[in-house]
Image (cartoon, helix red, strand yellow):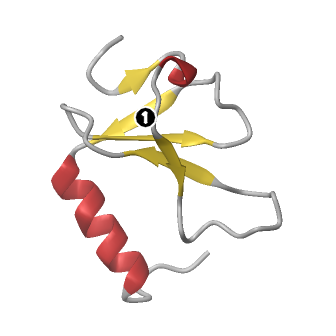
């Protein structure tokens, strides 16, 4: 595992679905809180797949931009 990815994200526990993901079962992400080196993010459809780790400060700015409507789909 390097500092930017987790090859098998299913090896970690405590994942939660993003509140911005819909209930339709389509494009959903999950995040893992309180990870020591940042915020891991994975695709909920492939929990055994990889996760990307974002620096905590960058993730906070991203979430704020989403909440403020600064990003569009």
- Residue 62: x, y in percent? 33, 66
Disc 1 crowd rating (10 Å Cα; few below 14, some 14-19, many 20+) is some
* 31 left or right, relative to 44: left
Dot 1: element: strand
* 64 left or right, relative to 20: left
Q: Which residue is mark 1?
A: 52
| In the image, residue 33 above or below residue 58 | above
Instruction: Determine the residue positioned at 35% across, 69% down.
Output: 63
Quarter assignment of residue 32: top left
| In the image, residue 5 above or below residue 26 | above
Instruction: Determine the residue positioned at 19% across, 32% down.
Output: 37
| In the image, residue 4 above or below residue 60 | above
Task: Give the tally of numbered discs.
Answer: 1
| In the image, residue 44 above or below residue 63 | above
- Which residue, as the protein is rendered here, is positioned at the far top? 1
The N terminus - image quarter: top left
- Residue 47: x, y in percent? 64, 30
The C terminus - image quarter: bottom right
Instruction: Determine the residue positioned at 51% across, 50% down.
Output: 16
Quarter assignment of residue 54: top left
Instruction: Determine the residue positioned at 29% across, 57% down.
Output: 59
- Residue 40: x, y in percent? 39, 38
- Which residue, as the protein is rendered here, is positioned at the far front? 14
- Residue 70: x, y in percent? 40, 85
- Residue 15 versus residue 27: which sits nearer the camera? 15
* 15 left or right, relative to 56: right
């Amino acid at each position: 595992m390097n500092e930017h990815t987790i090859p098998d994200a299913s090896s970690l526990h405590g994942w939660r679905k993003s509140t911005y993901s819909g209930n339709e079962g389509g494009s959903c992400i999950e995040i893992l809180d309180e990870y020591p080196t940042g915020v891991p993010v994975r695709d909920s459809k492939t929990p055994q797949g990889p996760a990307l780790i974002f620096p905590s400060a960058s993730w906070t700015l991203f979430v704020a931009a989403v909440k403020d409507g600064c990003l569009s789909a």
